[in-house]
Structures are given as structure tokens and as C-alpha cells.
Amino acid sequence: MGDFDYQKLDDIIHSRIRLAIMSVLVTITEADFNFLKKQVNATDGNLSVSLKKLEDAGYLTVTKSFIDRKPSSKYQLTEEGRTAFKVYIDQLEKLLGK
Amino acid sequence: MGDFDYQKLDDIIHSRIRLAIMSVLVTITEADFNFLKKQVNATDGNLSVSLKKLEDAGYLTVTKSFIDRKPSSKYQLTEEGRTAFKVYIDQLEKLLGK
């Protein structure tokens, strides 16, 4: 790599669990909590906190509803989230010299 | 990506600044503090703490000497560090589905 400011890497996305969540969501339209939990191998608590942080950053939205009287939450990336992920990957590749 | 445990990503390497340091050191034999500082765009304090953490993990070694009566520290990756970096990149690519 050349002269690279590591702070260009989006810190919201860079955390391991949030990177895993974003990597799942970028490939699909939406996902529910349990699907994400299985894909990312996270505990309920860690997943909840991480999803909230991504939501607060404007990178994903959550739609809550009831299915058979059970609450269901669907998560999907916003356009802002998709753009931020693309920028993150570009910066990561620059950092790694790829 | 498929079913992936984000905790497989080496946390020692994954921090943005340590990832930047490893990315520099993996391409060269050794580097001194000021060169790393310039490459990584870090403050002295952050760089020192990060280098110490990588040294404690066994990923790099430091050789201290005097050049023209000034102290000089040379940093180089250990074999363990190079292997850990390769594993990290492999895991990262799996996570990102690349």
C-alpha cells in the first residue's frame, strides 16, 4: 500500500460483527432477525446492539410487524448503507493494496 | 456470504490502525517508526500502542539501535505475523464473499 490514512475506513462498518451484518444484507433484499443471527453467528444481545448502531447511522431500516401474532423484524440496507459499504470496500482494497 | 462466524476474523489485526501497519509491513523487510507513521498517518501515541500490541501478539519484532547517537527502532513482521495476516485476508475474503 502507499500513503493511506486508515481513518478513511468507515468505523461504523469496520467492526467485525457489523461488517458481517452488512455483508449479508448487501446480497439480499431483506432479512429477519433470526436469519441474521444464524448467518452472523451472534448472540441476541450483540446482534441487537449492532443492528441499532447501523440503523442510527442510516445504513439500514427495520420494518416491524406481526406474523401469526408473533413480532417480526425485517432489516434491509438503505441506499446510503449500500453506498457506504461500496466506499468501505474500495477503501479496504486500497489499504490492502489490492 | 454464507454461514460465517465473524469471530474468525483476527481481532488483533482487524483494528483499522493495526491493519494499516500490517499492510505496510507485509510488503517490506523492515520499517522504522517515522516511516510507519507517515505511511499509516497515525499519531506517535496511537502508533506506539498499536505496535506494542502487535509485538505482544508475536506478530512483529522490534530492533532498537543508535544511528548518529539517535535511537532508532526497526519493526519487522515475524513468520507468525505473516501467517496470521494471510489467514486474516483469507477469512476477510470469505466474509465478504470474494
Image: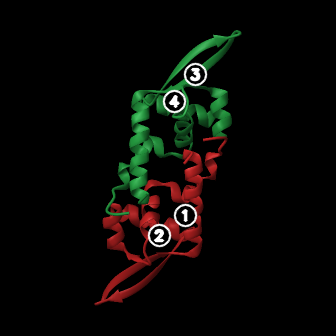
Chain colours: A green, B red
Q: Which residue is farthest right? A: A68
Q: Which mark is residue A74?
A: 3
Residue type at mark 3: give it.
Lys
Q: Label 1 vs label 3: CA separation?
A: 35 Å
Residue holding disc 2: B26
Under circle 2, the secondary element is loop
Under circle 3, the secondary element is strand
Residue type at mark 2: give it.
Val
Q: Between B72 and A77, which is closer to the camera in this rendering?
A: A77
Res A36 → quadrant: top right
Q: Between A11 and B91, which is closer to the camera in this rendering?
A: B91
Q: Residues within 10 Å of mark 2 (few under 14, many from 20)?
A: some
Q: Residue at x 52, y 26 (%)?
A: A76
Q: Residues within 10 Å of mark 4 (few under 14, many from 20)?
A: some
Q: Which mark is residue A36?
A: none
Label 2 marks a residue whose chain is B
